[in-house]
Image (tube, rainbow, N blue to C red):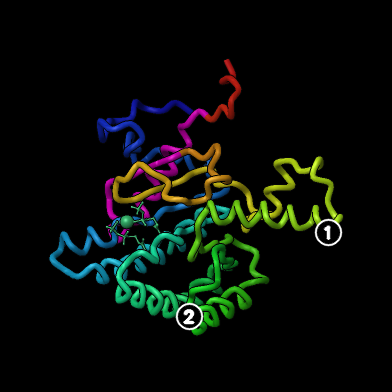
Amino acid sequence: MAMSEPSRRSDSPGVERVACSPEDTSWRERLPRHVAIIMDGNGRWAQAQGQPRIEGHQRGVTSVRRTTEHAARLGIEQLTLYCLSSENWRRPAAELEFLMCLLEKYMIEERELIMRENIRVRMIGRRDGLPASTLSELDQTVEMSAGNTGMTLCLAINYGARDEIATAARRLAEEARAGSLDPGGIDEDMFASRLATAGMPDPDLLIRTAGEMRVSNFLLWQISYAEIWVTQACWPDFNETLLEEALADFARRDRRFGGLSPS
Ligand code: IPE
Ligand code: IPE
Ligand code: MG
């Protein structure tokens, strides 16, 4: 299908480069299987409104809800959301406490949406350090949705990619020491099968809000060939339109995986 020349939205490479015309919906035929999002800028959003940082986190939950529902309805196979990094423990105790309460509340309040939209919830990240009550609500939501057959919603909570990779290496070393594994047989597929994301497709599209051009220890192994899309919008301002813009841009990308474009 012929596409009109996209208009430039920004001079920075990779940042909101195209605006799709509303009538062009051809991107719906070229959806990524797996979208991963670094939900950033909650604090900056709040500060810009003269409000405390936690207000940004609170408002961010609405963006999570809208994005999840829209992605599921569009037919995205997996949505992975970076909710808390292993480095976020460096933040003030009061902010962390608020985030834990918010997570717990989210796990309860989103069950209706999760079951209505046939979404299967999974979690990646370290359980240690998270409050027992938060883990309990999380486990209940994961269990309740385990039989759902629609989109997988993977929540990265207390997640760090380097820790995930080191853990996988440790697992393989222990299996080798126990004699159940030949170290010479370790290849990429075997390594990936020891990661927290075992069995999940790699992200095709990585979205980051709030303009930062970095990956902040997110899915380092899995994003090897992900297409990156960055918006200046802070996470509380992310919505269905921006998700569609990212998907439309993704549909125009020439993914070569090291090879050459078909001539
Ligand atoms: C993202 O927003 C949410 C978490 C990391 C938990 P931030 O809290 O990082 O917001 P900024 O980047 O400081 O604006
Ligand atoms: C990344 O955002 C982590 C999450 C979105 C959960 P940060 O705000 O922690 O990233 P940096 O510190 O700016 O790299
Ligand atoms: Mg941030």
Is residue 2 in the magenta section? no
- From the top left corner, tell me how far across and down residue 133 is, in percent: 49, 84
Is residue 249 in the magenta section? yes
The foreground one among 58 and 116 is 58
The foreground one among 141 and 82 is 82
Q: Residue furthest bottom?
A: 133
Q: Residue at x 74, y 47 (%)?
A: 190
Amino acid at pointer 1: Ala
Q: Quadrant of the C terminus?
A: top right
- From the top left corner, tell me how far across and down residue 59 is, in percent: 29, 68
Residue 221 occupies quadrant? top right
Q: Residue furthest top?
A: 263
Figure check: 21 above or below 161: above
Other-residue count near label 2 (Cα within 10 Å), few / some / many at <14 / 14–19 / ≥20? few
- From the top left corner, tell me how far across and down residue 128 is, in percent: 54, 73
Q: Nearer the viewer, mark 2 or mark 1?
A: 1
The foreground one among 85 and 197 is 85
Query: Quick one: SS at disc 2?
Result: loop
Q: Residue at x 50, y 61 (%)?
A: 159
Left or right of 262 on screen, residue 159: left
Question: Residue 26: in sight, yes or no?
Answer: no
Amino acid at pointer 2: Pro
Figure quadrant, ligand 3: bottom left
The boundaries of the magenta stretch are 228-254
In three-dimensional space, the C-alpha distance between marks 2 and 1, rounded to whole angstroms, equals: 34 Å
Q: Are marks 2 and 1 in contact (CB under 8 Å)?
A: no
- From the top left corner, tell me how far across and down residue 110 is, in percent: 46, 75
Q: Which residue is mark 1?
A: 178
Q: Which residue is mark 2?
A: 131
